[in-house]
Amino acid sequence: MSHAVLNARCLCGAVEFTAVPENDEAGVCHCSMCQRWSGGIWFARRCGELTMVKGDALGIYDSSEWGERGFCRECGSSLFWRQKDGAHNAVAVAAFGEHDGVRLTSEIFYDVKPDYYALANETEKMTEAETIAFFTGGQDGNHG
């Protein structure tokens, strides 16, 4: 099933981009970096290439040897995480204006999730080691 190009933006509108979600699924990341970056759980959709429409305020944080995070330098919105080699783009679910039909299906870094919350959805869960191996092809390194 082909998915439509969706518009995404930060809170203030200084950063706007388009992306095509790969499917109707969303996942969450429980890693300590995402907790600090987003103020809690980070919900994202896996997407193809991101196309900037308005990006002068786009900031990129080099968060690890293999990942970087996009955010708005004006309002601070957490917008996307992407693998530096281009193999994976994860866009914040909240950056998209529409959420109809999106299903929560996965959780990564599940073994480092804080004890003070639990999600009710049945999801596929990956530990920190499994997640890092998935994104790095088994190489050691910082997550994120």
Image (cartoon, rainbow, N blue to C red):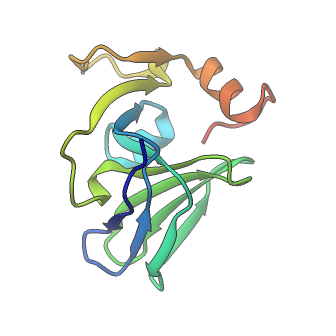
Residue farthest to the front? 1
> Residue 110: where, in percent of width, then height?
45, 19
Work out which quarter of the rendered image holds the N terminus and state it. top left
Q: In percent of the image, x 52 and y 64: which residue is there?
A: 50
> Residue 67: where, in percent of width, then height?
65, 49
> Residue 143: where, in percent of width, then height?
63, 36
Instruction: Depth check: give the residue in front, 107 or 7.
Output: 7
Q: Residue 7 is drawn in which quadrant?
A: bottom left
Instruction: Depth check: give the residue in front, 137 or 23.
Output: 23
Q: Is residue 53 above or below residue 41?
A: below
Residue farthest to the right? 139
Q: In percent of the image, x 34 and y 65: which residue is there?
A: 8
Q: Is residue 55 above or below residue 113?
A: below
Relative to 101, is 134 on the left or the right? right
Work out which quarter of the rendered image holds the C terminus and state it. top right
Q: In percent of the image, x 41 and y 59: which residue is there?
A: 79
> Residue 13: where, in percent of width, then height?
28, 78
Q: In percent of the image, x 25 and y 69: which residue is there?
A: 11
